[in-house]
């Protein structure tokens, strides 16, 4: 029998008290109980993983520990002493540091200026900068955190920006470091480097709390792992005694298939060909550099790459959002994108190009609109739902209800604002909108970003089904696992260029990772 | 974690505005006390002045008509997330359009003049708004700045025209000759009289009906047509709009044209209904009050009607108050109006969190469990 009884129990043998102990924390937002009786014990000098689906309550729990929220009830103990954390500055005082998923850095400032931001101490900036420079040097030596203190944040790659965040926390005297989804923006190599840093931190006696949804990372780096589901702690495990399969099952509450079941592809004729597309942005930087490829019916073409290397621009060009001056794209035999051609996403949708945007908050949906209104975005001029003047809103609602049933959207309420759905259900609404119009080419960006495991399985099955129905699918994802398991052919993008093509059977994560970092294209290693 | 806490409609649209309004009245009462007057008596004068007798009601509705036009104008632009501060200038220039129609088509029958005047006001007001709209859509010049500046330009142009070109010959006043009788907007008491009902004389006229029809039209346009959808989409999230093939620039142009057109109709009430000539500064700040009206009415036509009635009552009742209680000067009346705008518009969220908390406590019973798929799967 498994023991879940490590709850809040102090170690028996009189060792050091736990670095962090949360005892029976409760937090409600209105009727939503985000955390119910959450208990966790984090031993000092360990890396403790916290896994759970989106909305399981991980972020809420950490927000209480870091002083963003006040718990409704329950207590927090740091190094054995009950404390009250009313604000992040209290947390910092208690030696807790946090590295947020989205970095909190001032981009035009230098590394040094960012590190002292908020703890300048004294009226003259020069003194604190000098002090910080010395301290930074010490931290860099001690933990292998090398960053040029005078570099500007905006010139640094994400991996280094993250390092600055860690340095910021350590500079403030953090003994316990909370990392929230730290590897989302990193290449596999950069992630490995981060893990080496975490190793060093652990060896130096620091405590690390790692929030992630990537089970592979949990297995690779943590000592202990806690699983959350629906606002409760469902299990605590020593990492050595558990497996990815077990953790996945605990997270979702049922058995899940981590591998995608699919037959080999049987590609047909080519429907899309992209020829010599180059896109230069306002600052004169080449966002897309001479991109050439084609996609055939019945195949999923995966585009791998660290985010920000031209994938977003590629999707926007293909879907008609951004016009191009150089190159052309043909779809089903005629030009859809070419210099001087005024492409329009609505017109392209009519011709059969569906587009699931990478970022549903920024682009794919309008969060204040109802689900039903979101299901007509881009198709709102469809004669099926329009009279000469007025829209047939009953029809829109009915159609939306149909989508919700077929895509298992919960709750199935067409009038609920999009922001009222969980990430997975939002994504299902977007997918339903684009797939139900039966496109011949489906552009999909980050289909499972911020989506829970249960929904990921569903979305992957749907994409495979599209392919098997003879549609062309272009899949852009920063999750290598996703590309490897879904795509039939993989292109790697780096700095706006396609730096390589591999077939999915032959591709390995290491090989793709090196290509993503532009290794064979550029001698300079990024991380 | 962006789950919305839905409040019952009656709380959102009824109770919260009412509490805000009460707060405004309480503070107003303190101000009145501070100048040594009895707030209850002041309230009695305002209410009596606005609603106590037929003529008072007529004036209240007449003021409300102007506010409905300008409030709708601000709301229309706001649905595209544009702050149209230029309602005053658009109303003024729209009045020029209406005035020209009435001056030069005076020998036509009223039923010919009316549609022409509506088109004239709408086109002039709309085109005046189109210039800042174009600058915003194509050049990125912020519409708040440009519309404010266009108010001054409109004012200068109108003064110039009224002094140099349109002035009645032989007169010193910056105003045109009177319109022909056929261009007078029928007043409600005149219509009632024709039907055998006697009402007290007041300036309220059929522009009120036109204003209410505009409310319906705006509501339909915004929430029931694809163009309204495009405008709202552009206003809420321009990037998502572009993703959906909607041109935000086009939405800006359409919404501002309609916004300016609505403001331009103020002249129907003011010029054709009351002044019967084009006079300098006939807009009298109604365009600016429209901003407050839209704010109080939450940019919804129904809310705008209610807010317009409230402001109309404060305008008319305030005049009565200033007349009855000498210490309550025009400035004191403006203070009260300002407090109402402050509490019902700008400080809308002051009491909201507490009220939300109150109502959530009362329905803890259906405390929603996790939204995770498996839980609900078990229920199903």
Image (cartoon, helix red, strand yellow):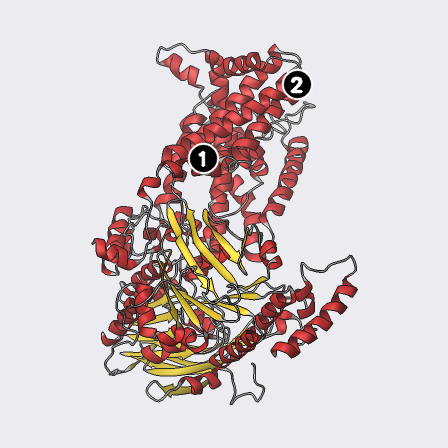
Kindly indicate the quadrant of the structure image that contains residue B177: top right
What kind of element bears circle 1?
A: helix
What kind of element bears circle 2?
A: helix
Q: Are marks 2 and 1 on the same chain?
A: yes
Kindly identify which numbered label has been placed on residue B355.
1
x, y percent for residue B72 = 47, 36
**Residue name at image x 24 percent, y 72 percent:** A465
Kindly identify which numbered label has been placed on residue B34.
2
Q: Is residue A83 visible?
A: yes
Pick whichever of labels 2 and 1 is earlier in the sequence.
2
Q: Chain of mark 2?
A: B
- In this view, the residue in front, B87 or A267, is A267
- In this view, the residue in front, B361 or A409, is B361
Tell me if residue B229 comes above or below residue A104 in the rendering. above
- In this view, the residue in front, B36 or A299, is B36
- In this view, the residue in front, A360 or B57, is A360
**Residue name at image x 57 percent, y 32 percent:** B342
x, y percent for residue A173 = 63, 65
Q: Chain of mark 1?
A: B
Left or right position of A440 against A85: left
- Image quadrant occupied by the C terminus of chain A: bottom right
């Amino acid at each position: 029998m498994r023991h879940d009884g490590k709850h809040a129990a102090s170690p028996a043998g009189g060792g050091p008290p736990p670095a962090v102990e949360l005892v029976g924390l409760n937090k409600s937002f209105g009727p939503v109980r985000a955390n119910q009786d959450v208990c966790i014990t984090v031993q000092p000098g360990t890396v403790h993983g916290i896994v759970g689906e989106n909305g399981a309550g991980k972020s809420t729990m950490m927000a209480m520990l870091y002083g963003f929220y006040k718990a409704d009830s329950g207590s927090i103990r740091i190094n054995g002493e009950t404390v009250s954390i009313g604000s992040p500055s209290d947390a910092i005082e208690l030696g807790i540091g946090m590295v947020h998923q989205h970095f909190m850095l001032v981009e035009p400032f230098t590394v040094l200026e960012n590190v002292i931001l908020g703890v300048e101490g004294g009226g003259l900036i020069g003194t604190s900068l000098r002090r910080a420079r010395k301290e930074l040097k010490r931290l860099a030596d001690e933990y292998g955190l090398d960053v040029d203190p005078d570099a500007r944040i905006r010139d640094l790659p994400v991996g280094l920006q993250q390092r600055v965040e860690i340095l910021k926390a350590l500079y403030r005297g953090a003994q316990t470091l909370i990392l929230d989804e730290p590897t989302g923006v990193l290449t596999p190599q950069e992630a490995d480097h981060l893990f080496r840093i975490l190793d060093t931190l652990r060896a130096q006696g620091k405590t690390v709390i790692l929030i992630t949804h990537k089970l592979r990372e949990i297995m690779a780096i943590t000592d202990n792992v806690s699983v959350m589901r629906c606002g409760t702690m469902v299990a605590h495990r020593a990492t050595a005694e558990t497996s990815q399969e077990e953790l996945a099952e605990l997270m979702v509450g049922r058995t899940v298939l981590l591998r995608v079941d699919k037959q080999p592809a049987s590609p047909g004729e080519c429907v899309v060909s992209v020829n010599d597309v180059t896109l230069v942005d306002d600052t004169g930087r080449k966002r897309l550099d001479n991109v050439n490829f084609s996609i055939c019916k019945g195949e999923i073409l995966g585009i791998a790459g660290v985010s920000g290397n031209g994938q977003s621009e590629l999707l926007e060009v293909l879907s008609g959002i951004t016009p191009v001056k150089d190159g052309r794209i043909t779809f089903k035999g005629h030009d859809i994108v070419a210099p001087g051609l005024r492409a329009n996403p609505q017109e392209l949708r009519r011709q059969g190009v569906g587009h699931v945007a990478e970022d549903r908050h920024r682009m794919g949906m309008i969060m204040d609109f109802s689900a039903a209104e979101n299901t007509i975005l881009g198709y709102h001029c469809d004669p099926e739902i329009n009279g000469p003047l007025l829209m047939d809103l009953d029809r829109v609602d009915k159609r939306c209800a149909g989508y919700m049933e077929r895509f298992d959207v919960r709750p199935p309420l067409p009038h609920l604002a999009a922001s009222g759905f969980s990430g997975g259900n939002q994504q299902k609404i977007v997918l339903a909108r684009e797939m139900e119009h039966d496109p011949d080419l489906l552009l999909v960006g980050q289909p499972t970003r911020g989506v829970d495991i249960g929904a990921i399985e569903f979305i992957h099955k749907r994409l495979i089904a599209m392919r098997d129905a003879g549609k062309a699918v272009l899949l852009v994802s920063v999750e290598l696992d996703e590309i490897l398991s879904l795509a039939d052919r993989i292109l790697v993008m780096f700095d706006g260029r396609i730096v390589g093509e591999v077939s999915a059977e032959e591709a390995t994560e290491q090989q793709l990772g090196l290509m993503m970092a532009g290794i064979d294209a550029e001698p300079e290693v990024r991380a | 974690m962006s789950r919305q806490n839905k409040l019952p409609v009656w709380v959102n649209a009824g109770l919260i505005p009412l509490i805000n309004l009460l707060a405004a009245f309480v503070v107003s009462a303190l101000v009145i006390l501070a100048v040594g007057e009895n707030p209850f008596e002041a309230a009695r004068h305002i209410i009596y002045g606005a609603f106590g007798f037929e003529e008072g009601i007529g004036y209240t509705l007449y003021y409300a008509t102007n506010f409905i036009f300008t409030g709708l104008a601000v709301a229309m632009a706001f649905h595209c997330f544009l702050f149209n501060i230029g309602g005053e200038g658009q109303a003024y220039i729209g009045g020029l359009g209406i005035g020209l129609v009435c001056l030069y088509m005076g020998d036509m029958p009223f039923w010919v003049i009316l549609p022409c005047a509506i088109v004239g006001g709408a086109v002039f007001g709309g085109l005046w708004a189109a210039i800042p709209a174009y600058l915003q859509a194509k050049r990125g010049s912020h519409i708040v700045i440009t519309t404010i500046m266009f108010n001054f330009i409109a004012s200068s142009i109108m003064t110039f025209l009224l002094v140099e070109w349109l002035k009645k010959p032989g007169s010193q006043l910056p105003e045109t000759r009177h319109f022909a009788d056929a261009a007078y907007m029928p007043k409600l008491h005149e219509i009632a009289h024709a039907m055998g009902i006697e009402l007290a004389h007041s300036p309220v006229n059929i522009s009120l009906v036109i204003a209410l029809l505009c409310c319906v039209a705006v509501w339909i346009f915004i929430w029931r047509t694809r163009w309204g959808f495009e405008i709202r989409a552009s206003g809420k999230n321009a990037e998502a709009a572009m993703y959906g093939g909607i041109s935000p620039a086009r939405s800006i142009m359409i919404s501002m044209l309609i916004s300016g057109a609505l403001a331009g109709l103020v002249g129907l009430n003011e010029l054709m209904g009351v002044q019967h000539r084009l006079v300098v500064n006939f807009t009298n700040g109604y365009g600016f009050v429209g901003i407050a009206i839209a704010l109080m009415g939450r940019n919804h036509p129904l809310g705008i009607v209610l807010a317009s009635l409230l402001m109309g009552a404060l305008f008319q009742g305030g005049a009565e108050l200033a007349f009855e209680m000498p210490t309550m000067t025009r400035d004191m009346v403006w203070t009260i109006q300002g407090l109402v705008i402050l509490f019902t518009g700008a400080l809308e969220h002051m009491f909201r969190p507490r009220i939300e908390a109150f109502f959530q406590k009362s329905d803890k019973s259906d405390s929603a469990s996790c939204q995770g798929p498996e839980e609900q799967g078990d229920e199903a």
